[in-house]
Image (tube, grey):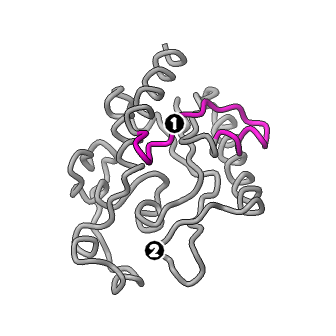
Amino acid sequence: KVFVVAEAVGYQGGRFSGIAITCERMLLDKHKTIRAKDVTTIQLERTSSPTSSLLKGTQQKDGFNEPTDTVVWSAIIEKGINPYDTLLWNIFPFHPHKEGNPLTNRTPTDREQQVGWEYTKRLLDLHIELGGAEPLVLAVGQKSADTMGKFGLSAIGLRHPANGGANLYRQGFAEAVDTYLK
């Protein structure tokens, strides 16, 4: 019912969890506010990482915590939306980082956005082909909304949670869900 699209995978989230807009601590039930049962019914355990020597002790023990992921998931949970009625995705479904430094984030290039758009379009098409209704498409931040618009997909652009935007994101999310999912 709800398709939430961010710009790219971040190093504190999907780079290690493998799941868009979802960090390890949520999946491992070590997050302060998001319980694993709110995200999935599958019980998961952390395995070692090839970059584990770069991680701090808490990150090695409990996994990464991604602030944007926390805000997105808290908005979903606050509205009582079944996580299986929500599809989380990134326009660029890979982790763009500074060369030689995997624990950084950078904005995807135009070429990366084009490549990522192909995956996004396929995912939406597959959803419709399998009998899914046209979802409410929400963009995490204006960059995501603009990128989807550039490729012809209209999305409601929500305030990005970073830099003091968490409450505005939650408010925009709640208003969109209330308006479009009545």
Query: What residue do we see at 57% from left, 71% from top?
Result: 97
Element carrying mark 2 = loop
Magenta stretch? 145-165
Q: Residue 112: say if magenta.
A: no
- 97 left or right of 85? right
Q: Residue 161: say if magenta.
A: yes
Compared with 80, 65 (above or below) is: below
Total numbered badges shown on the rendered structure: 2
Which residue does the numbered mark 2 point to in the structure image? 103
Q: CA distance from mark 1 to mark 2?
A: 25 Å
| Amino acid type assigned to the residue bearing label 1 in the image | Arg
Compared with 24, 141 (above or below) is: above
Query: What residue do we see at 47% from left, 27% from top?
Result: 172
Question: Mark 1 vs mark 2: which is more N-terminal?
Answer: 2
49 and 174: which is toward the camera: 174
122 and 93: which is toward the camera: 93
On the image, which quarter does residue 115 sit in? bottom right
Crowding at label 2, few (<14), some or many (≥20) Cα neighbours within 10 Å? some
Which residue does the numbered mark 1 point to in the structure image? 159
